[in-house]
Amino acid sequence: MNPTRTAWLFLAPALTVLGVFFLLPVIAALGLSFTDYDLYALADVRNLRFVALANYWSLLQRPLFWAALGHTVYFVAVGVPLSMATSLGAALLLNSPLARWHGFFRTALFAPVVTTVVAMAVVWRYLFNSKYGVINTVLGHFGIHPVDWLGDPHWAMPTIILFAVWKNFGYNMIIFLAGLQAIPPALYEAARIDGASSWRQFRHITLPMLRPTLVMVAVLTVSGYFQLFAEPYVMTEGGPLQSTMSVLYLMYDEGFEWWNFGSASTVAFLLFLVMFAVTSTMLRLVRRGDET
Amino acid sequence: MNRGTRRPVSGWRWWLGGLLLIALGGCPHTAAEDNALTFWTIGREGEAIMQLLPDFERQHPDIQVKVQQLPLTAAHQKLLTAIAGGSMPDMAQLGNTWLPEMATLGVLEPLQSRVDQSAVVRPDDYFISIWATNVIDGTLYGVPWYVDTRLLFYRKDLLAQAGFDAPPKTWAEWRRMLAALSHPERHVYGILLPTNEYDQLASLALQQDDPLLRDGGRYGNFESAGFKRALRFYVDTFRLQQAPAITNVEAGNPWSEFGRGVYAFYFSGPWNIGEFRLRLPKDQQQAWSTAPLPGPDGPGAGEAGGSSLVIFRPSRHKPAAWLLIEYLSQPQVQQRFYQLLGDMPPRRSSWNGAALRDDPQAQAFRQQLERVRPVPAVPEWEQIVNEMQLSAARVIAGEMDIDEATAKLNRNVDRILEKRRWVLAHGNRAESTR
C-alpha cells in the first residue's frame, strides 16, 4: 500500500464524521438560505420557493438586522478588551511570587467558567433587580440613584457585558497563566539586574513573550463573543426594546421561534461572513506587525 | 441459535426460552408500551392530569396513558420538531392560538364526526367564542379543555377609600379610578401592565369593531381607528404615570406588591386567583376581587384564550384518544380539574358546580367568558402579536408616536404575512391536498 493511500485511510474516519456532521449540514443550510423554507413548506413541499439572493437582500434592508449587528459589535468591541484585560490581570496576580494560596484562587477565579449560564444568569438577574437587587442597595449607600440595569435599553447591554466577562475571564486566565509560566525567569533576572521597573519588565518582557498567546486568545474570544446568545436569552429575552438582541438571537428567533429556516440560515451565513472578515483582518494586522 | 443445523435443543434451553417468552408476553408493561396512548401536556396541566388519570384507567383497563410534560418555553419547538420528524404523540394539549399553525401543517385529526356521535361533548354547552377558536376554515380540530381570558383583579378596599363602590364599566370610569389611585411620587400606581406582555393590549384591541387583520388574514389592519384608540388608551396609562413602564422581569413579585397597595388593579388571568389566595395574608383575602373588563362604552370584550385537546392524524389510537377527551370533558372531571389547578372549564354546565358557582372571584370570569372574542386564526399570529407589543413599548418609551408606530407595525405585519398571501393565492394548503 502506498503512503498516500494509507494516509487517506487513516484520515477517513475523521473526514467522514466531519463530512456528515459538519460539512453536509453547512451545505444544506447554504441551500436553505436560497429558499423560503418555513411552516408552509413543512406542510407541503410545493410551498417551497427558490428565491436566490432575495433572503439576503431583504435581510440587509431590515433595520432589526442592522440593530442586532450593532449590538453584537458593541458587545465584542467592549467585551473582548475588557475580558482579556481582566484575564491577564488575574493571571499576573496569580503568577506573582507575592501571591499566596495560588491553588485556591486559581480554582475560585475559574469557577464561574464551569457554572451553567442559565443558573448564573438567574442569580445575576436578582442581583441587578432595580428595586430589590443587591447592586442597587450597595450603590444606594454611596448615594447613587438606583439604576434600572436590565430594564433600561442603555444599561441592559453593559450589564450583559459585565456578566459575560465575569463568566468567561477564568478560561483565558488559565491560558495566560500557562503562557506566563513559560517565560524563562532568566529574562526577568537580567532585567532586574539592569534596573528595569516592574512596568518596564511587563512592557518589554511579558507582553512580547506573551504575544502568540495574546493573538490566539484574541481571535478565539472575538469569534466566541460574536456568537452572543445565551446571556441575553436568559437575562433579558433580547429586550428591553430589542436592545440586547444579538445576531445569533435574531437567527434563533427566525428559525426556532417562527420556523423561517430560509431567513434564519441567511442570518447565519451573514454572521459567518462578518466574523470571517473580522478575524482575518485581525490575523493580517498581526502578521504585518510581525514583519515590521 | 442456528436453525440450519437443527441441533437438538437441550432441556435448559427450552426452559430459558420459555421463561423469556413469559417475561416478554406476560409483563403487562412491555406489552402495553407499544399500545400506550401518548399524551403531551404543556406546563402545569401535566401534573394535575396525573391525578385525574387513575379514574380513567379504572374505567378503561385496556388503555394505558403515557403523559409527557413539556415546559411551556420548549413546547412549540418540540411540537414542530416532532412534526418535522414524524414522531408525533397520539394526542396533545394545544393552546388555541397554536391551532391554526398545526392545522396548516395538516397534522390534526378533524373531530366533527366524533363530536356528532358523542353523548358527552355537546358544543352548545361550550362558550361560543371558545368553541369557535377550534374551528379553522370550517373544520373542527380540537375540543376546548380549559379557558383563559384576561380581566381585572382589583383592591376593593383601595377603590372604596377613593370613593368608588364598584369596579369600572367603561374606559372613562376606569381612567378616573386610575387617576385617583395613582401617586407616582410615592411609587404607587393604578395598575400593573408589564410592557413585554401582549395580552393586555390585545384584549383592549379585540374590544374594537375593527378586526386586527383584514382580507381574510392577508394584511395587517393596525392603522384602523379602532386599534389606534386601543393603543392610545394603553399608552396614555403610562404617559399619565398610572402604570410603571416596566417589564415582568422587573415587576418580580406582583402579588405581594398588589397586597402592599403598590398597584390597585392587575390585568391578568385566572391562574392568579390561586396565586393571590396563596400569597396574600388571610386578613387581606376579603380586600380583593375580580371584575370583567371595562369597554370603550360599557362592558368590554376579552381575549378567547385557553387550551384544547387535539388528536394527531398519524395516531394509531384515535378511538382511545377520543375516549380520554370525552372523559376530560365531563363536567365533574372539569370541576375536579379546576379544584386541582384553578384552570377554568369551557363548559357552562361545569360552571354550575358549587366550587365555581359560589365563588365570587371566579364568577367575573364567567361573565367575561360570555363576552370573549377570538384572535385572528392565522399561523403567524404569535409573531404578529409580538410585533404589536414591541411597537407599543416603543411608543411608551417615547421613541415614536402612535401614527408612526402603527404604520411601521402594519408594514412589518404585511411582510410576515407575505408567504400566507402567496400560499392562499396558489392554493397549496395542506388540508386540500390530503
Image (cartoon, rainbow, N blue to C red):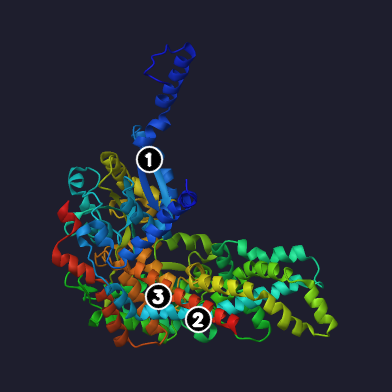
Indicate the quadrant containing the N terminus of chain B: top left, top right, bottom left or bottom right: top left
Seen from the viewer's position, the closer of residues A165 and B296 is A165
Dot 2: what SS? helix
Q: Amino acid at mark 1?
A: Val
Q: Amino acid at mark 3?
A: Asp
Q: CA distance from mark 2 to mark 3?
A: 53 Å
Seen from the viewer's position, the closer of residues A23 and B238 is A23
Residue B359 visible to an observer of this rendering: no
**x then y, percent, for residue B391:** 35, 80
- Image marks 2 and 3: residues in contact by CB distance under 8 Å: no
**x then y, percent, for residue A69:** 43, 78
The dot on residue B65 is 1
In-image side of B177 versus B301 (left or right) = right
The dot on residue B165 is 3
Instruction: Please give the chain letter of the residue carrying mark 3.
Output: B
* Eye-nearest disc, 1 or 3: 1
Q: Mark 2 highlights which residue?
A: A74
Dot 3: what SS? loop
Q: Earlier in the sequence, mark 1 or mark 3?
A: 1
Dot 1: what SS? strand
In-image side of B76 versus A74 (left or right) = left
Q: Which residue sits at x=70%, y=69%?
A: A177
